[in-house]
Amino acid sequence: MSLCATFHGTSTRIIRSPGSRFRYGHGVVLVLENTDRPGMVGRIGTLLGDHGVNIATMSLSRNQAGGTALTVLNLDTVPSEDLLREIRASEDIHSAQVIQL
């Protein structure tokens, strides 16, 4: 996965990924590539909530309906390795990465 970032004041902001657009990213960022289908936002939110991880902001983008979606979540805390394994094992999740900006 390739991401473009810029500096905004003293913060680093993700601004683009090939084929996707979203507003920003800062702090603890969880970047997911997943199948675009109903229920994905709820599934990810439930997994994070079950592990006590709060979502600060969320941005979604897709290449086409039913295609590949990019989900960028700013989190209040770094997700555990157990949680990341659970997310990656989820149906329709193609990749999951944590970036700290």
Image: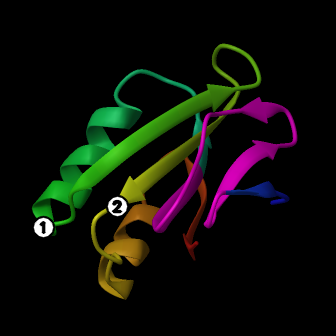
Q: Can you give x and y, in whole percent of width and height, for residue 13 in the image? A: 65, 55
Between 99 and 90, the one nearer to me in the picture: 99
The magenta-colored residue range is: 9-32
Q: Is 96 above or below relative to 65? A: below
Q: In the rendering, at what x and y percent does residue 72 appear?
A: 53, 47
The residue lying toward the viewer, choosing from 38 and 1, is 1
Residue 89 in view in this figure: no
Task: Answer left or right for 24 relative to 16.
Answer: left
Left-right relation of 98 to 53: right
Q: The residue under label 1 is which amino acid type? A: Gly
- 10 Å crowding of disc 2: few (<14), some (14-19), many (20+): many
Q: Quadrant of the N terminus?
A: bottom right
Q: Quadrant of residue 41?
A: top left
Q: Is residue 97 above or below residue 82?
A: above
CA–CA distance between discs 2 and 1?
11 Å
Residue at point 51%, 35% (across, down): 59
Residue identified by numbered label 1 = 52
Whether 26 is among the magenta residues is yes
Of the residues shown, which amino acid type is indicated by label 2?
A: Leu
Residue 10 place in picture, x, y as percent? 62, 67
Residue 22 visible? yes
Say if the magenta span includes residue 57.
no
Q: Which residue is mark 2?
A: 75
Nearer to me, 2 or 24: 24
SS at mark 1 in the image: loop
Taking the view exactly as shown, the residue that stands out farthest to the front is 9
Compared to residue 25, the image places residue 18 above or below, namely: above
Quadrant of the rendered image containing residue 68: top right
